[in-house]
Amino acid sequence: PHVSLAITTSLLSFCWAVAGVLGLGVFFFTRVTPKNTRDEVADNGHYPSYVTLTGIEFSPGMLAIARQRAAELQRKVDLRAGNAHHLEFADASFDTIVCTFSLCAIPDEQRAVSEMCRVLRPGGLLLLADHIASSSWLARSVQRLMEVVTVPLGGEHFLRRPLLSLPAAGLTVEQSHRFKLGIVEQVAARKLL
């Protein structure tokens, strides 16, 4: 059975922090075994043993960093090479998906969001943190200039806004927060039942 987690500030902060500790750009997919887990995942400082973590990353170098960090944390994590456009998981496989600072570098971010939604269980939670187009016109102008270099060299986009494509993918935005001149956004969205 599916276990739904309440969205709290501590849960959001914890999920994004864990993704950052193991390596930016890694998707984290979680499965929770049946148990009352409301807020326990975030409040005890670690994912409990009944939470299974799976991560994908396109870059072998980032995967190596994530494996090393997981070993340092003594946490078993299924880390594998993967492509966000073609996730090798069955439909409705995961309770929660965390994607940090990846959609800005994925060639087709809408396709990646659709794939995440496909593997997310109905009622499941998608947590995103990414660079986005600034709310400040001056910062947005700088972002446009940066993209002249970053897009051709590394595929890094600064003017995307993944939040806007979530409803079309079948997700309801429950929380969003912009900071750092509006150039970073955290989003919590839930897959429709």
Image (cartoon, grey):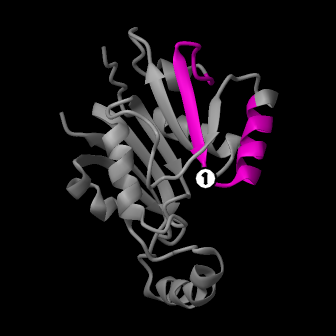
Residue 8 place in picture, x, y as percent: 41, 33
Can residue 188 be seen here? The reply is no
- x 50%, y 90%: residue: 141
Name the kind of residue labelled 1 in the image.
Gly
Q: Quadrant of residue 134?
A: bottom left
Residue drawn 32% across the image and 32% down it? 92
**In the image: residue 42, left or right of residue 38:** right
Answer left or right for 192 relative to 107. Answer: left
**Residue at 38 percent of width and 10 percent of height:** 34
Q: Does residue 151 sit above or below 111 in this rendering?
A: below
Q: Going 58% across and 38% down the picture, which residue do you hit?
A: 55
Foreground residue, 150 or 146? 150
**In the displayed structure, would residue 107 be above or below residue 185?**
below
Determine which residue is flagged by label 1.
25
- Mark 1 nearby-residue class (10 Å; few <14, some 14–19, many ≥20): many
Find residue 87 and report its horizontal and vertical position in percent.
Answer: 45, 45
Q: Magenta stretch: residue 68 in it?
A: yes
Q: Which residues are magenta?
A: 45-70
The quarter in which the C terminus is drawn is: top left
Residue 192 x %, y %: 20, 39
How far across and down, in percent of the image, does residue 39 sit? Answer: 44, 22
Count all numbered tags in the image, as a single digit. Answer: 1
* Residue 46 highlighted magenta (yes or no): yes
